[in-house]
Amino acid sequence: MHMAKVVIIYDSATHNTELMSGAIADGVRAEGMEVMVSHVHEAKLEMINDIDGLVLGSGTYHHEIMPALEVFIEKMKGLELKDKVGAAFCSYGWSPEVVDLITNRLKGYGMKTVDGLLIKEKPDEAGLERCRQFGRKVATLVKGNVR
């Protein structure tokens, strides 16, 4: 029985998504789970080889996933992600579509996805609490998934 592992990878133009990723990680840890957080520029595919849950975060880039994260998602194609838990989060200014775009990509890889988390611009304390709850929700799903 391996320790369930969740990896959070984000791309952030304004640090808002970075703030969110830290709070989501706190939520995952609160459920007693190992979690690794990485900026997409430091992220390696090996990091998600043996994960149980993957949470991807992006700022919004002209209604699209930020380019570096888009490239990373593309590279995930060959990995064994079927039936693992996947989730997306996004800090947005104008367009909230990115969370659905990422979620759909994860679904395409056969992952079990949860409704993504959207926070407008910089998360305040209530927003960070929502991030922590989101992390807990992901961790709870992973627990139910890992037998």
Image (cartoon, rainbow, N blue to C red):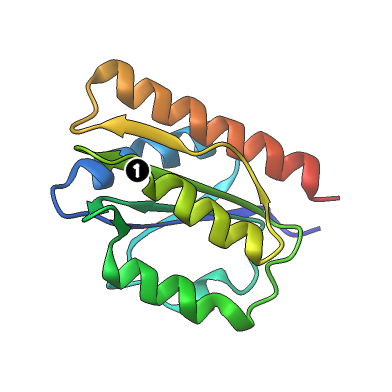
Q: Is residue 117 above or below residue 69?
A: above
Secondary structure under the numbered disc 1 in the rendered image: strand
Q: Residue at x 18, y 32 (%)?
A: 122
List x then y, in percent, for residue 45. Answer: 49, 78
Residue 33 at what x, y percent from top left? 59, 44
Give the number of marks. 1
Residue, far right: 147
| Residue 56 picture quarter | bottom left
Question: 40 or 90: which is nearer to us?
Answer: 90
Residue 144 in view = yes
Return the x and y of residue 105 as percentages of the image width and height: 55, 62
Kindly identify which residue carries mark 1. Answer: 90
Q: Residue furthest left?
A: 14
Could you tell me which quadrant the N terminus lies in?
bottom right
The residue lying toward the viewer, choosing from 24 and 102, is 102
- From the top left corner, tell me how far across and down residue 116 is, in percent: 49, 39
Task: Judge whether residue 31 can be spotted in this image.
Answer: no
Q: Residue furthest top?
A: 126
**Residue 110, relative to residue 45: is it above or below?**
above
Q: Callout 1: few (<14), some (14-19), or many (20+) C-alpha neighbours within 10 Å? A: many
Name the residue: 60% across, 31% down.
Answer: 137
Residue at 49%, 25% (x, y): give it: 133
Q: Name the amino acid, label 1.
A: Cys
Q: Nearer the viewer, residue 41 or 31?
A: 41
